[in-house]
Amino acid sequence: MTDPAAISRAQAAALKPIEDGRRRRGEDNRARIVAAMLEIIHAGEVVPSAEQVAQRADVGLRTVFRHFQDMDSLYREMSGVIAQELHSAAEIAFKSQDWRERVLELIARRSWAFEKIGPFLRASAVFRYRSKFLEADNVEFVTALRAILKRQLPPEVARDQAKLEILDVLLSFETWSRLRREQGLAPKPAREVLEAAVRRLLD
């Protein structure tokens, strides 16, 4: 008489390669969807649709929504990818021992970072006021930038509320975006403007 348990084990063994294949395809589709969203936003599309993402990723629209129940969850996934990139940049040691020069180094670092993630930040701003995640993510982002700045300042400067607030806004993404877009400056002149402003404030 055939052992039912042995049959079940044999069936499970036969199905495992199929299940593994489906899981790998699912993981591949998810990665392609995230990459497609990033590519569309970096190309300048502030509010990409699920249809655009599906077309760029070469997957069906149902596949997009199967992996991401709504576009907010897709932004969550992308935010994690970008945060990982910025974390790697933040780990680079400062070259200067002088705190003023380290603040200027921050300008150079942030100009590079803001250029890299600027399209995403502008796109997420469109949805921020109807997305609790994006609003919280923005608060965390701004708070982290402020904390990094304060760590480079001596206590007497960090306690100077007016000076701290001016530095915080000068080194913000909003100021960088204004210089680059509304005022039409290229990255190098925009960075030089910020460096000149900070030097005058700190000297």
Image (cartoon, rainbow, N blue to C red):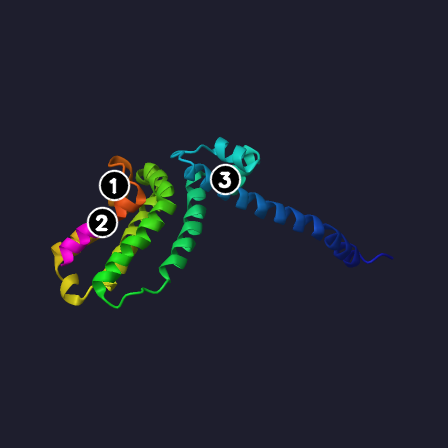
Amino acid type, residue under disc 1 in the picture: Leu
Amino acid type, residue under disc 2 in the picture: Leu
Is 170 in the magenta?
Answer: no
* Mark 1 or 2, nearer chain start: 1
Is residue 188 or residue 179 the one in the foreground?
188
Boundaries of the magenta span = 193-203
Residue on which disc 2 sits: 194
Label 1 and label 2: CA atoms lie apart by 9 Å
Q: Quadrant of the C terminus?
A: bottom left
- Label ID, residue 179: 1
Label 3 and label 2: CA atoms lie apart by 33 Å
* Mark 3 or 2, nearer chain start: 3
Whole-percent x, y for residue 185 in the image? 27, 39
Is residue 56 or residue 8 the one in the foreground?
56
Instruction: Determine the image quadrant of residue 190.
Output: top left
Looking at the image, residue 152 lies above or below residue 67: below
Whole-percent x, y for residue 117 in the image? 37, 46
Residue on which disc 3 sits: 36
Is residue 45 or residue 66 the one in the foreground?
45
Amino acid type, residue under disc 3 in the picture: Ala
- Label ID, residue 24: none
Label 3 and label 1: CA atoms lie apart by 28 Å
Q: Can residue 137 be spotted in the picture?
A: no
Whole-percent x, y for residue 5 in the image? 77, 58
Quick check: marks 3 and 1 in contact, CB under 8 Å? no
Give the overall secondary structure of the magenta segment. helix
Q: Residue at x 24, y 44 (%)?
A: 175
| 130 relative to 75 in the view: left or right | left
Q: Quadrant of the N terminus?
A: bottom right
Quick check: marks 3 and 2 in contact, CB under 8 Å? no
Q: Residue at x 53, y 32 (%)?
A: 55
Is 200 in the magenta?
Answer: yes
